[in-house]
Image (spheres, coloured by chain):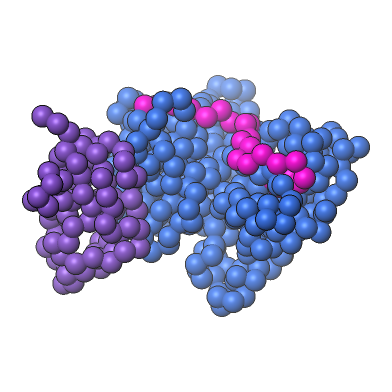
Chain colours: A purple, B blue
């Protein structure tokens, strides 16, 4: 998913099966804006009810923008950040 | 850290990364504790390790500290390298014989026929209303008894380096990690412990304190959570024109008195901050060590620690007894 400018959205790929809630909280970010990440690097940790889950980079690139910072609440499907993919 | 590191880790992830690396390289390393396998440690100290290493090497133990700490001592004496965890440092009591009479003394009493290359990890610290038996920070108790090294990380970077060193050490090491520095969702850390952490292995030598903030007017010597509270206090003091130096001990045994004395010779003022009880502990030890070596340089002393009371459960009372940045700032101001 992109926003029309090549940037790729970072979302929680798999919502926990046993979670009743559709909302979560961002607990820890591991990368700052402007830093490079590889595909599948752990970007941040979120908490849904009592369960902590990592959110991974969908592609390699630069973390262009953090949308949901630490302590931010988010809903299922929300974009948490944007990555500018590395040039092919 | 010369090259730029793009990722930061929480303190718990940095500890786990060190443990995982050592376990991959040496089959003799294993972790035992309460709720360390599927649960990943109640303070995330083993998060993810059971999935990689299985139940034999990430071992849940019964609620019997005497039994499993004793087993760890035995395993270590047979050549394994166990890491055994006290879920709360407060639980040492029932197993203290295994800790201070076995783990700490068997090397000596056997004439070095055995060594005890184990790491005793323990969660310390309050600030989250867990009351008197689950909130203690017993640095003094463990540092006082000879035969074990005692280290206390304050950031992710230090946590990984100290853990690598602890596992590789052929002698017993007590590794005391503060619950509020781990980066857990339900016990949020202050800004500070989450730092860039190199991907490769590295060690931090024991007996080496780290100056976290340079300053000319006062020396704040501290460890663990209070490194971050001292840094907050220093920022606030700077606004009042007082330039505080913050020394993170990192290691209680061995203790780096040289770094502390160098700082006192610069500032003349010693403020020691400790989350353990005031009497017969870290604050007294640091003041006495400096007085031993550099009495002439010492103009002013403040000890900031918990009063000698069981830690309260009521939130306002607990906040009152555990020193915060304001208490540290006030103590520094009293010396100026």
Q: Which span is picked out in magenta?
A: B200-221
Along the viewing direction, whichever of B103 and B200 lies nearer the viewer: B200
From this view, report whether residue B319 is shown above or below residue A43: below
Q: Is residue B55 left or right of residue B241?
A: left
From this view, report whether residue B205 is shown above or below residue B322: above
Residue A71 in the image: state x and y as whole percent. Answer: 35, 63
Residue B23 in the image: state x and y as whole percent. Answer: 33, 31
Res. B202 visible in picture: yes
Residue B133 in the image: state x and y as whole percent. Answer: 55, 65
The quarter of the displayed image where residue B110 is located: top right
Question: Residue at position x 85%, y 49% from top?
Answer: B300
**Residue B214 in magenta stretch:** yes
Q: Is residue B177 left or right of residue B52?
A: right
Along the viewing direction, whichever of B152 and A21 lies nearer the viewer: A21
Screen quadrant of the C terminus of chain A: top left
| SS assignment for the magenta stretch, majority | loop
From this view, report whether residue B104 is shown above or below residue A47: above
């Amino acid at each position: 998913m992109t926003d029309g400018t090549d940037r790729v959205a970072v979302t929680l790929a798999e919502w926990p099966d046993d979670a009743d809630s559709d909302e979560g909280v961002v607990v820890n970010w591991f990368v700052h804006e402007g830093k490079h990440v590889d595909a599948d690097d752990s970007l941040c940790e979120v908490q849904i009810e009592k369960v902590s889950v990592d959110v991974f980079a969908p592609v390699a690139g630069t973390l262009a923008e953090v949308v949901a910072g630490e302590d931010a609440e988010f809903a299922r499907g929300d974009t948490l950040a944007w990555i500018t993919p590395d040039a092919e | 850290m010369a090259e730029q590191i793009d990722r930061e880790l929480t303190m718990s992830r940095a500890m786990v990364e060190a443990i995982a690396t050592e376990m991959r390289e040496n089959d003799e390393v294993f972790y035992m504790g309460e709720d360390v396998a599927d649960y990943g440690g109640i303070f995330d100290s083993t998060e993810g390790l059971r999935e990689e290493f299985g139940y034999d090497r990430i071992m849940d133990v019964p609620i019997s500290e005497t039994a499993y700490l004793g087993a760890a001592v035995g395993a270590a004496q047979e050549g394994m390298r166990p890491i055994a965890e006290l879920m709360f440092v407060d639980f040492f009591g029932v197993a203290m014989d295994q800790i201070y009479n076995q783990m700490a003394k068997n090397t000596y009493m056997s004439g070095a026929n055995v060594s005890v290359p184990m790491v005793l990890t323990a969660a310390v610290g309050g600030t989250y209303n867990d009351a008197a038996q689950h909130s203690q920070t017993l640095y003094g108790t463990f540092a006082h008894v000879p035969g074990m090294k005692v280290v206390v990380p304050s950031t992710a970077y230090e946590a990984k380096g100290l853990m690598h060193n602890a596992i590789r050490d052929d002698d017993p090491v007590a590794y005391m990690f503060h619950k509020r520095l781990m980066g857990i969702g339900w016990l949020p850390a202050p800004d500070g412990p989450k730092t860039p952490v190199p991907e490769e292995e590295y060690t931090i030598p024991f007996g080496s304190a780290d100056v976290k903030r340079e300053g000319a007017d006062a020396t704040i010597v501290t460890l663990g959570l209070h490194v971050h509270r001292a840094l907050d206090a220093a920022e606030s003091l700077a606004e009042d024109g007082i330039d505080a130096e913050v020394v993170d001990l990192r290691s209680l045994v061995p203790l780096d008195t040289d770094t502390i004395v160098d700082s006192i010779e610069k500032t003349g003022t010693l403020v020691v901050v400790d989350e353990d009880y005031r009497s017969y502990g870290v604050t007294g030890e640091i003041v006495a060590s400096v007085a031993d070596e550099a009495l002439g340089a010492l103009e002013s002393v403040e000890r900031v620690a918990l009063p000698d009371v069981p830690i309260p459960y009521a939130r306002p009372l607990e906040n009152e007894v555990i020193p915060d940045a304001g208490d540290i700032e006030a103590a520094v101001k009293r010396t100026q």
